[in-house]
Amino acid sequence: MDETIHSPPRSFSKAAFKAILLLVFIAGAIFSIRFTPIRNYLTPEALGNFLKIAGIWALVVYILIYTVGVCLFLPGTLLTGLGAAIFGAYWSFLYVWFGAMFGASIAFFIGRTLGREFAGSLIGDRLRKYDDAIERNGFATVLYLRLVYFPFTPMNFGMGLTKVHLRDCVFGTGLGIIVGTFTFTFFVGMLKDVWTSGNWGELISLKVFFSIALFIFSFLIPKIIKKIRAEEG
């Protein structure tokens, strides 16, 4: 009697292969920046010197570094603090915002291209309604998670695995990171200006107090949002 060997559907095999590529990419990125000589080039000093060498192209290079760094799981505080220290308390906000937006969009695209098909095949009937709800409320979901400081890079890839539309992820991210980005860059930029000038009397200036107040307020945003949601519920 002949035995028929049933192989998994070709579409599922392709989805699984792409999911493996996604895992290899993420694991390789984390391993490279933590356990290889590459990490020696990712310090504030090394990156700062590299941007100085870039000259008039420093802005473009910085945004490119931020974009790639987001996809490779580089710490956002490192990239943002570096931008604030180099470009100042005001312009750095804009440059960091653009770098974060480009990086988030590319990471989302990678997650969507390599992982969504496989993730969708694993979703049962119980989870499918949540996946559909996320699709319907994509903008609000992304905005909320950004405001409560959900880990930035994992969320970029994770949203790609859901049915959230790219436009909802982009607009939700763009709006959701404004407050946190501005407060952090302004705070670091102001401290850098005081340190560089050596005028320690500026530490009691209105601008410094304002930057500190914004910095502290940024940590209260998640609690405020959760309280509002609890009252509405």
Image: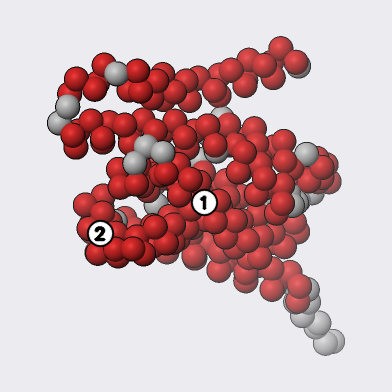
Q: Which residue is mark 1?
A: 98
Residue 174 lies in quadrant = top right
**Residue depicted at 36% across the width and 30% down the height:** 187
| Above or below for 67 versus 185 | below
Crowd around label 2: few <14 · some 14–19 · many ≥20 (10 Å) = few
Which residue in the rendered view is the most extreme toward the bottom? 2
Q: Nearer the viewer, residue 35 or 69?
A: 69
Q: Amino acid at mark 1?
A: Phe
Q: Nearer the viewer, residue 218 or 155?
A: 218
Which residue in the rendered view is the most extreme toward the left? 198
| Above or below for 142 versus 55 | above
Find residue 186 and report its horizontal and vertical position in percent.
Answer: 39, 33
Q: Which residue is mark 2?
A: 52
Element type where label 2 sits in the image: helix
Find residue 112 and report its horizontal and vertical position in percent.
Answer: 66, 60
Crowd around label 1: few <14 · some 14–19 · many ≥20 (10 Å) = some
Please identify the quadrant where the C terminus is shown.
Answer: top right
Q: Say whether residue 132 is left or right of residue 57.
A: right
Q: Nearer the viewer, residue 13 or 154?
A: 154
Find residue 50 and report its horizontal and vertical position in percent.
Answer: 26, 61
Q: Say whether residue 40 is left or right of residue 80.
A: left
**Residue depicted at 19% across the width and 37% down the height:** 196
| Above or below for 225 versus 154 | above
